[in-house]
C-alpha cells in the first residue's frame, strides 16, 4: 500500500478571495477527501515575512486563511494542517538545503529576476531593494516540501519553477548524503479556472480587483455589481466569451447551470439580472460556510489549538527526519566516532560505507555499498532512524555473526558483505556507520 503525499502552502499576507478559493483552496480540500492521499496543508508565515513587514497583517491573515480552510471543510483530523513557523525543523532544513543549492540557480528564480529587471529598467543597482529573504525564497519553499517528502505539490503555474528547484535540491542532497528525499512534482490543475477580477484582469491582490470570499453579503453584492461589463442594454444578446461575470459564474456553477446562464446571455438578460444571478450562485456555496468562518474569527484561540495540534502531528514526522539528516550531513554526537581529519578522508575513499535513507513508505532503510558504490547489503524498512542505526551498529560490531543475527531484517545480502563488515570493524576506520544516539560508545566498543 503506498499513499500519495500531497503538500501545499499559502502565504499569510492577505485575505482569501474568490480566486484563491476557486483556484487553490476548494480543489485542495476536495483532493484531501480522496482515499489514498496523505495531505499536508500549511500557512506559510515564514514566507509572509519576505513579502511584508506588517506584523498585524501577518497575524490577521493567518487567522483568516486558517478560518477559510476550516470553513471550507478541511478536516484537521484527516489531514496535517499546521503553521510553518511552528515547525522549527523547517528553518534547520532550509540551511541544509542552502548549502547544496547553487547560487546561480537562485539567480534564475522568476521573482528575483523580475526584481533585478525592474531595477535595470529604472537604472538602479541590480539588487536594489532586494532582500536576501526574497533571494532565498525558493530554498525555504524547498524545505517545506522536502521536510515531509511530498510527492505532489499542487500549485499555480507561477510556482512550478520553485518545485523544479526543490527537486534539484533533493537530488543534490541525495547525491551528497544518500537517498533521503523523494523528488517532488508540481501538480498544476489544468481545469481550475483562473478567475478574473472586478476589472477583468486576473483576480489578484496586486491588481486590487478582488472579491473577498467572506465579504459580508451586502458588500459582496456591491462588489459584484461593480464587475466590468460592456454597455449592451437589456434585451440585447451578450457575449459569454471574455465576460468576467460569466467566467466567475462558471467557476461556481454545475455545467447544466452554466448552460442555462449561457442561454440567458444569448437571450439578452440584463447585466443587473446577470449580476444578481451571480451573487445568488456564489452565496449558495459560500453562505453555508459563513457561520464556521465567523466562529473561527470570533474565537481565534480555537484556531490556535487546531494549529498547535497540527504542528504536533507534523513534528512527529519532521523531528526524527531532521535527526537522520543531521546525522547524514555530519552533525553528530562526538562520542560516537571521532576521526582524525586527514587520514579519515583517505580511508573513506577506500572503505565500504553504510547509507541511511527514507523511502516513500515512511520507513527507514540502510544499505551497505563498497568503495566503488556497488550494493553489498540492503535492509528491510525500520520504524525509526534509531532502530536502523542500532542495526547498523550491531552489524559493524559483530560482522558475519551480525549478518546471521539480523537476517530477518535484511532484504538482500551479497557475497562480499561479511568481508566488508570485517573491514569496517577494524578499529578507528572511518566507516560512516551510525551508533545508537544515546549510546555513543556502542559502535566502537566490542562487547565481550
Ligand atoms: N510560494 C507559494 C505561493 O506563493 C506558497 C508556498 C510556500 C508553498 N511554501 C510552499 C506552496 C510549499 C507549495 C509548497 O503560492
Image (cartoon, rainbow, N blue to C red):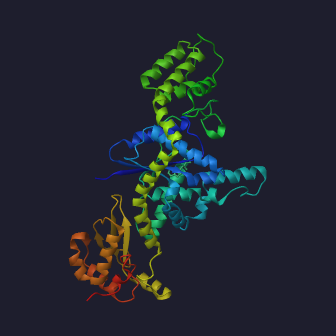
Report the residue that reaches farthest toward the right.
Answer: 123
Q: Nearer the viewer, residue 105 or 296?
A: 296
Q: Is residue 118 above or below residue 67?
A: below
Give the quarter of the figure containing the C terminus: bottom left
**In which image quadrant can residue 432 be found?**
bottom left
Q: Is residue 244 visible?
A: yes
Image check: 2 left or right of 66?
left
Q: Residue at x 65, y 36 (%)?
A: 208
Q: Residue at x 59, y 35 (%)?
A: 203
Q: Nearer the viewer, residue 197 or 303?
A: 303
Image check: 1 left or right of 357?
left
**In which image quadrant can residue 177 be found?**
bottom left
Where is residue 221 shown, x and y percent of the image? 58, 24
Q: Residue at x 63, y 51 (%)?
A: 55
Q: Nearer the viewer, residue 378 or 38?
A: 38
Where is residue 218 shown, x and y percent of the image? 59, 25
Q: Nearer the viewer, residue 93 or 411?
A: 93
Q: Is residue 165 visible?
A: no
Where is residue 29 shown, x and y percent of the image? 43, 41
Q: How many marks?
A: 0
Image check: 422 left or right of 311?
left
Q: Is residue 73 above or below residue 309?
A: above
Q: Residue at x 71, y 58 (%)?
A: 127
Where is residue 268 shown, x and y percent of the image? 56, 12
Amino acid at each position: 500500500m503506498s499513499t500519495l503525499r500531497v503538500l501545499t502552502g499559502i502565504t499569510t499576507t492577505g485575505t482569501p478571495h474568490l480566486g484563491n478559493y476557486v483556484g487553490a483552496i476548494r480543489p485542495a480540500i476536495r483532493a484531501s477527501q480522496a482515499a489514498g492521499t496523505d495531505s499536508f496543508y500549511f500557512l506559510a508565515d515564514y514566507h509572509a515575512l519576505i513579502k511584508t513587514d506588517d506584523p498585524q497583517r501577518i497575524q490577521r491573515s493567518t487567522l483568516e486563511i486558517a478560518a477559510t480552510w476550516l470553513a471550507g471543510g478541511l478536516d484537521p483530523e484527516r489531514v496535517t494542517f499546521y503553521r510553518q513557523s511552528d515547525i522549527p525543523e523547517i528553518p534547520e532544513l532550509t540551511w541544509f538545503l542552502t548549502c547544496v543549492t547553487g547560487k546561480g540557480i537562485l539567480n534564475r528564480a522568476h521573482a528575483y529576476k523580475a526584481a533585478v529587471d525592474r531595477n535595470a529598467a529604472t537604472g538602479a543597482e541590480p539588487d536594489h531593494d532586494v532582500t536576501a529573504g526574497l533571494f532565498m525564497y525558493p530554498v525555504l519553499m524547498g524545505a517545506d516540501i522536502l521536510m515531509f517528502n511530498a510527492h505532489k505539490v499542487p500549485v499555480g503555474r507561477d510556482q512550478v519553477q520553485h518545485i523544479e528547484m526543490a527537486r534539484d535540491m533533493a537530488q543534490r542532497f541525495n547525491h551528497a548524503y544518500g537517498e533521503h528525499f523523494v523528488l517532488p512534482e508540481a501538480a498544476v490543475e489544468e481545469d481550475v479556472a483562473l478567475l478574473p477580477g472586478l476589472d477583468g484582469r486576473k483576480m489578484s491582490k496586486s491588481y486590487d480587483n478582488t472579491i473577498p470570499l467572506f465579504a459580508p453579503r451586502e458588500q459582496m453584492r456591491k462588489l459584484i455589481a461593480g464587475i466590468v461589463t460592456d454597455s449592451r442594454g437589456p434585451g440585447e444578446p451578450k457575449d459569454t466569451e471574455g465576460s468576467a461575470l460569466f467566467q466567475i459564474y462558471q467557476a461556481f456553477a454545475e455545467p447544466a447551470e452554466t448552460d442555462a446562464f449561457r442561454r440567458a446571455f444569448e437571450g439578452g438578460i440584463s447585466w443587473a439580472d446577470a449580476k444578481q444571478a451571480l451573487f445568488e450562485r456564489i452565496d449558495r456555496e459560500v453562505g453555508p460556510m459563513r457561520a464556521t468562518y465567523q466562529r473561527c474569527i470570533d474565537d481565534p484561540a480555537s484556531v490556535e489549538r487546531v494549529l498547535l495540534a497540527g504542528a504536533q502531528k507534523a513534528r512527529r514526522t519532521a523531528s526524527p527526519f531532521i535527526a537522520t539528516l543531521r546525522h547524514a550531513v555530519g552533525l553528530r554526537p562526538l562520542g560516537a566516532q571521532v576521526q582524525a581529519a586527514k587520514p579519515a578522508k583517505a580511508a573513506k575513499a577506500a572503505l565500504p560505507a553504510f547509507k541511511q535513507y527514507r523511502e516513500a513508505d515512511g520507513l527507514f532503510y540502510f544499505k551497505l555499498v563498497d568503495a566503488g558504490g556497488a550494493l553489498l547489503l540492503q535492509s528491510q524498512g525500520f520504524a525509526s532512524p534509531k532502530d536502523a542505526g542500532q542495526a547498523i551498529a550491531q552489524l559493524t560490531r559483530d560482522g558475519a555473526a551480525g549478518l546471521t543475527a539480523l537476517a530477518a531484517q535484511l532484504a538482500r545480502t551479497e557475497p562480499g558483505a561479511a568481508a566488508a563488515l570485517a573491514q569496517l570493524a577494524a578499529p578507528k576506520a572511518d566507516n560512516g556507520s551510525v551508533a545508537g544516539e544515546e549510546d555513543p560508545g556502542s559502535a566502537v566498543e566490542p562487547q565481550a
